[in-house]
Image (spheres, rainbow, N blue to C red):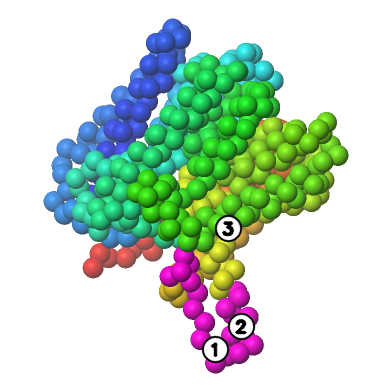
Amino acid sequence: MNYQIIRNIIGKIMILLAMLMFLPLIVCVIYQEELINYVAFLIPIGLLLIIGVLFNLKKATNKKMLAREGFIIVGVSWLVMSLFGCLPFIISGVLTNPFDAFFEISSGFSTTGATVMGALNTPTPEQALEMSHSVMFWRSFAHWIGGMGVLVFILMIIPESDEGSAVHILRAESPGPQVGRLVTKMKASSRILYLIYVVLTLLLTVILWIGPDMNLYESLIYAFGTAGTGGFGIASNSVAAYSAYSQYVIAIFMIVFGVNFTIYYLILIGNVKEVLKNDEFKWYLCIIFVSVLLVFISTINIYNNIEETFRHSFFQVASIISTSGFTTANYIKWPTLALMVIFILMLIGSCAGSTAGGMKCSRIVILAKSTIKKIKLMINPRKVETIKIDGKPITDDMVFSVNSFMSVYIIVLLLGALVISFDSIANNSFETCLTLSLSCISNVGPGFGFSFNTCGDLNNFTKFYLSLQMICGRLELFPLIILFSPKTWRIKRI
């Protein structure tokens, strides 16, 4: 085990997190907040800088790392980020229970959007800022940090790892069944990804700001939540507090951020032919179209006119498939058909290589094609069948990887539901246990039983477990499982 490289990179993550915490400090200055809010960020900033510098006093002599080190770095880094990231909530007095604070920031970094702050928010944005502007900013900014992944950012600047080692980190943090380079150099690929991410976020902020009902601060809050596909906002009724203009803009950008960022790179370089050949992208758009149509048909008699029905249908489909979790309507009261569509979308999620959660469309495509192949082989065992994605054959190892992921995903989902069922707040409701667990592992936010309530009444153990499940879902299960596996620490480096 290369402990030196692990220590160095985790130290740099801590220094980077300290730098990012200076942004809410600027918000403190702008809004002339109370002294306690400055202290709430200065203490964790100081701790992170001291520990981060100490971790980097002795540079690693061996720059190489294996896949195991990559998984450990990612798993430990996200836990460290959550432990230090929750301190502003505790010090400022917004959340005095450490389990509540850890749950809230884990929900933020993992882009889940589940919350324990039920009493915090009020129906209108004008009345909602009972929490300080700076803490509210940090809460939503966590979505943006976790959306693309802080390790991807570190890859742009750290000199410790070579290209082969960087792949292990990117593979452990990036969503999807496989990780590829946009260009030859991995660090250059990371820069391109973040540039696209930043530009799209700024574009969304401006478009919301020039609209009829958001100031710059609100535009940033909802841009962070949309870009990171997280779902934290200001008002308790989410985006329903805003105009149809803002709802359409956010809905469109939720879909945009659910697309594999490689698609945008291909568009930028003019390679539209590759975009049109992308199976996952086509499936993603088809699933959205069919889902909106089904929800629209099932809810057409609920709302006042066709436009309102379409807007709510389009928004909720975009929100759930992108795992953002924003709402404009109380969809819990929708007909069963609409609820089934939403439940399926919670499972599927968006595209690999996006900021969204869920199983990812690419895995669903591979699973569907491998199932069809198996049926054909059962009918005609001598027939030679090849599974192709984007016109290219995929290996049996990739199919095995997808099947393994699906299996572990279901196990973690059911285990989470079992843990919640022991909690008194669940009231032995199968629907609540299952959908809340699914919401956490898919990083969606609202579950059917908790969409307009909060997780604040759950006991501390359940909150802590679901916090880990949210992080586990964001990291696609295996980094945390590997981190806590005894075998990880017993195997000797070869």
Quadrant assignment for the N terminus: bottom left
Give the spatial CA distance, label 2 vs label 1.
8 Å
Q: Position of residue 118 (x, y in %)?
A: 66, 27
Q: Amino acid at mark 1?
A: Lys
Quadrant assignment for the C terminus: bottom left
Question: Does 432 appear in magenta?
Answer: no
Q: Secondary structure at mark 3?
A: helix
The segment highlighted magenta reads 371-392
Between discs 2 and 3, the one toward the N terminus? 3
Callout 2 touching callout 1 (CB < 8 Å): yes
Residue visible at 84% across and 37% down in the picture: 302
Q: Position of residue 493 (x, y in %)?
A: 25, 64
Q: Quadrant of residue 486?
A: bottom left
Q: Which residue is mark 2?
A: 376
Residue 50 in sight from this viewpoint: yes
| Nearer to us in this view, 213 or 240 | 213
Between discs 2 and 1, the one toward the N terminus? 2
| Nearer to us in this view, 154 or 414 | 154
Residue 25 is left or right of residue 214, and the answer is left
Residue visible at 34% across and 49% down in the picture: 269
Q: Secondary structure at mark 2?
A: helix
Give the spatial CA distance, label 2 vs label 3.
22 Å
Q: Which residue is mark 3?
A: 283
Q: Which residue is mark 1?
A: 383
Q: Mark 2: few, some, or many residues within 10 Å (few <14, many ≥20)?
A: some
Question: Does 374 appear in magenta?
Answer: yes
Q: Secondary structure at mark 1?
A: loop
Residue visible at 31% across and 24% down in the picture: 46
Q: Amino acid at mark 3?
A: Trp
Q: Quadrant of residue 373?
A: bottom right
